[in-house]
Image (cartoon, grey):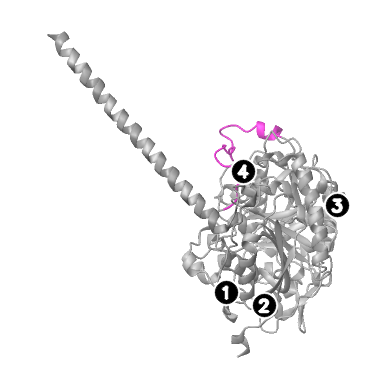
Amino acid sequence: MKNKDAKPGSKRDKMSRAVPIVVMFVLVCGFSFYLGGIYYSGKNSFFSKVSIPTTSQKDIVVAPFRVNPIAFPDCGTDFQDYTPCTDPKRWRRYGNYRLSFMERHCPPMNERKECLVPPPTGYKIPIRWPQSKDQCWYRNVPYDWINNQKSNQHWLKKDGDKFLFPGGGTMFPNGVSKYVDLMENLIPEMKDGTIRTAIDTGCGVASWGGDLLDRGILTISLAPRDNHEAQVQFALERGIPAILGIISTQRLPFPSNSFDMAHCSRCLIPWTEFGGLYLLEIHRIVRPGGFWVLSGPPINYQNRWRGWNTTVKEQKLDFDRLNKLLTSMCFKLYNMKDDIAVWQKSLDSSCYDKLNPSSYPPKCDDSRDPDSAWYIPLRPCITIPSENLKKLSLHTTPKWPSRLIAAPERVSMVPGGNGNVFKNDQSQWKVRVKHYHKLLPAIGSDKIRNVMDMNTLFGGFAAELIKSPLWVMNVVSSYGPNSLGVIYDRGLIGTYHDWCEPFSTYPRTYDLLHLDGLFTAESHRCEMKFILLEMDRILRPSGYVIIRESDYFIDSISTIAKGIKWGCEKKGAEVEKEKLLICQKKLWYSKMSQD
């Protein structure tokens, strides 16, 4: 019985399995035939549309991207110093914790302005470099707060229609040059090309960074938009590198192990609070063997405490607490004299090897890339330099200017990067910049001082301009290959940024903007008109733009450029497949201000 019952059952099972297989086979074949028909007919309709006789990909012609002409309105004089992502009018929306309201908080898309930011009434073309380091037009930065509140410290001085910068500061009343002279005596590496890049946190009007330019050291001056009114705007008006920023709850937009030196002169950053969290960020961005320089409380507390509204005992405790924290982070007290103290970050891993699980601060785990720094929260842990990078320290990095042309070790960390790729990139930029000089003779003249390369890889454009009287802010996309560490290893400066958002600077702060295929790379994420409106906001009147793009975008860029009052000319690139658009921004004044 069992055997008889089993035979029919097994036959039915086989048939039940076979039927779905046959049905599935028929369906797959039919669907494949259907897709093939769609593909073939679509393919034929595409080729007939563009009239291409062959199927070779090289011969396919894509119709250029088109936009309708548009004329953007005037934002009005209330927006003459508009900084969208650090807008004081929006601060109340955010918390006061650790001054986080001063960090980047960009407006949502429905609140973005589609208008042109005007210059102040009476705005003039900025004074040319190097005279601009010591003076600027008052009407270009019409703010009196620093002049009124810091007049006894000689930050700046109003003289007729100009602001003068005598080089004073809270901690250098005798002038910034004497202050830096003392610093050089404490840090001999400042004199021989060992130190090339620096960051000044809480920069005032950037007198320290301005003085270091004359000594071959390139400094990023960092300050928030706060009650000092336009610290960063004063710096950039003078022709000194600067960017809006604050150490608060997020990492600064720089890779790890970048700066040769960091500096704070009475910058009012509470270094010992929150478990030394802000010091840990300084540790992250300073390269091994690099220096951290502090002047102001609690340095020289024995002689200064009376003027700080405190007691000598409190200041001694603050200094001991500061030194203990820095020691726990593998800094050592390097030198100290008068109002200046210098700590040096460990050159190698020997100090970090001594840290144990109970140490504070603990070692950071591998869950976060130490170079990631775009809206990345600060972490209460110590970033250990990679053991795979043997030439990262200050004393193994070639001295300036040799480091500019030497292929940095970090090139290998960029996808597809190696020494040959780096060399080829530099050869390519040598040809390109030579061509730029022919098309735009203003490059190399005193008409161009502040330059931004909006989407660089290795900083090749900046490297080829190194002998010109200008500086370049190299911008690396927060969504692209992370090559910013390479740029700092070369002795250049830069920042991360996402061009779907406004940049961290004031209006009218750059003389030349350069971009290479930015719209090709970002058009799927960022709307073209908003990028161009942001470029117009940060570009000075009479400033220039060099746009290197494909044929697909160049006409639409030119159309929008007319709507933002740029005069543009199409030029041929040194490579036939690419086109150049050379534009100049016109000087205009708000009709509202004239009324």
Please check the rendered image and state whether residue 78 is part of the magenta-colored stretch, yes or no. Answer: no
What's under tag 3, amino acid-wise? Asn
Please check the rendered image and state whether residue 372 is part of the magenta-colored stretch, yes or no. Answer: yes
The first of marks 1 and 3 along the sequence is 1
Residue carrying label 4 = 370
Query: What span is in magenta?
Result: 349-374
Q: Secondary structure at mark 2?
A: loop
What's under tag 1, amino acid-wise? Pro
The reply to whether dot 4 and dot 3 touch (C-beta < 8 Å) is no
Q: CA distance from mark 2 to mark 1?
A: 37 Å
Q: CA distance from mark 4 to mark 2?
A: 39 Å
Q: Nearer the viewer, mark 2 or mark 1?
A: 1
At a point 77% along the width and 84% down the height, the residue shown is 160
Can residue 538 be seen?
yes
Q: Secondary structure at mark 1?
A: loop
Q: Quadrant of residue 440?
A: bottom right
At a point 73% along the width and 54% down the height, the residue shown is 493
Q: CA distance from mark 4 to mark 3?
A: 33 Å
Q: CA distance from mark 3 to mark 2?
A: 36 Å
Q: Position of residue 477 (x, y in %)?
A: 63, 53
The first of marks 4 and 3 along the sequence is 3
Q: Nearer the viewer, mark 4 or mark 2?
A: 4
Q: Residue placed farthest to the front in the image?
A: 53
436 or 153: nearer the viewer? 436
Q: CA distance from mark 1 to mark 4?
A: 44 Å
Residue carrying label 3 = 185
The reply to whether dot 4 and dot 2 touch (C-beta < 8 Å) is no
The first of marks 2 and 1 along the sequence is 1
Residue carrying label 2 = 143
